[in-house]
Amino acid sequence: MELLWFIPTHGDGRYLGSTKGGRAVNFSYLRQIAQAVDDLGFTGALLPTGRSCEDAWVTASTLVTHTKKMKFLVAVRPGLMSPGAAARMAATFDRVSGGRLLINVVTGGDPVELAGDGLHLCHDDRYRLTDEFLTVWRQITAGETVNFKGDYLHIQDGKLLFSPVQKPHPPLWFGGSSVIAQRIAAKHVDVYLTWGEPPAQVAEKIASMRRLAEAEGRTLRFGIRLHVIVRETETQAWDAANDLIRYVDDQAIAKAQQVYSRMDSEGQRRMSQLHNGSREALEISPNLWAGIGLVRGGAGTALVGNPETVAARMLEYVELGIDTFILSGYPHLEECYRVAELLFPHLPLQHSPPVEPQLFSPFGEILANQEFPQALVKQKTAAID
């Protein structure tokens, strides 16, 4: 079981739909989050992509030298990047980071935003382009010389002179809920991602993807993208969830839902259907709350509860086949620590948790319940007194 966090290059704060409690997202703040991810024992972090975000590749490149272990899940964008240029970017980052790159394949689901970047293909054509892109990208990064002519790409003697550390290439992650997206994922990627839908819907996706991958002679791993609101008690957790949207009014919900309705993303449609723009019945499955999706696109659900309950809900997804969780919470710096402190002890993590703190501070204060010789404890206590 692997846990990744999220680096909010599009903004952060204590409340959704409001500037109250908002934070300037500058390099100093992003570095704090990345170093917390690194120190606390998360596998890595996802960096978002799109015109509302700082560029993910530039941001990850500036953060990699300030971290030691964490991996960076960074997007390639078929139609906005050529496969050869994307392969060079990936190989360079993978080498300079010592193999700490994960690739997030993002086809895009907002025709308005894509048109602003010069891409004017319909939904299915974008995925057909993605198929061609990944065919070329995988061959180039594996060290092959590529000659390819498709409906969208024409590559002559494409090659990579400096190979990545990870072989045959950095792992490919991909999230897409439409039929054509799932077929392409089964053909190319290593980790298939879903947003935080109720377990029954996730189970259907996993079953479908396993059938498609088997037809391609492949196997997949599965991951899920969720927010998490964990507190010491159930009451505190649900109070925190409601507090997160305290400034979200009906006008803000209507405006956000209007934007999401223009998208041709099947995943976004499924997310929006979980709440239908209404505040009523936001707990769509036990401890799974859709309040975030009222005003946030993409990942719109959160697991809410005390550590034992949230861990139990996560393990329900594990039983379905999920082994990787990409989590986030507002604000991301504090919630990163909270999740590590409260939730990690209840989960069978693949990665090692951070080393426990020393028993004594320089002033002799007891910091952890470790067994030290009683004589030493008495000596320290006497010195303080």
Image: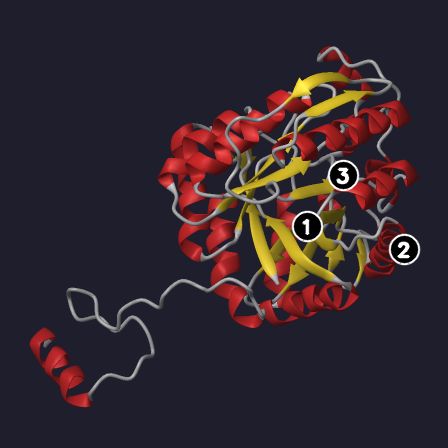
Give the amino acid at mark 2: Arg
Q: Tell me if label 2 and label 3 are in contact, CB under 8 Å.
A: no
Give x and y (percent) for residue 132.
Answer: 79, 27
Q: In this view, does 127 lie to the left or right of 374?
A: right
Q: Which of 301 and 370 is in front in this view?
A: 370
Q: Name the residue under label 1.
A: 226
Please tell me how crowded label 2 is: few (under 14), some (14-19), or many (20+) other residues with Cα within 10 Å.
some
Is 272 situated above or below 140?
A: below
Nearer the observer: mark 1 or 2; the answer is: 2
Helix, strand or loop for disc 1: strand
Q: Residue 294 carries which label?
A: 3
CA distance for labels 1 and 2: 25 Å
Give x and y (percent) for residue 371.
Answer: 29, 84
Q: Tell me if label 3 and label 1 are in contact, CB under 8 Å.
A: no
CA distance for labels 3 and 1: 15 Å
CA distance for labels 2 and 3: 33 Å
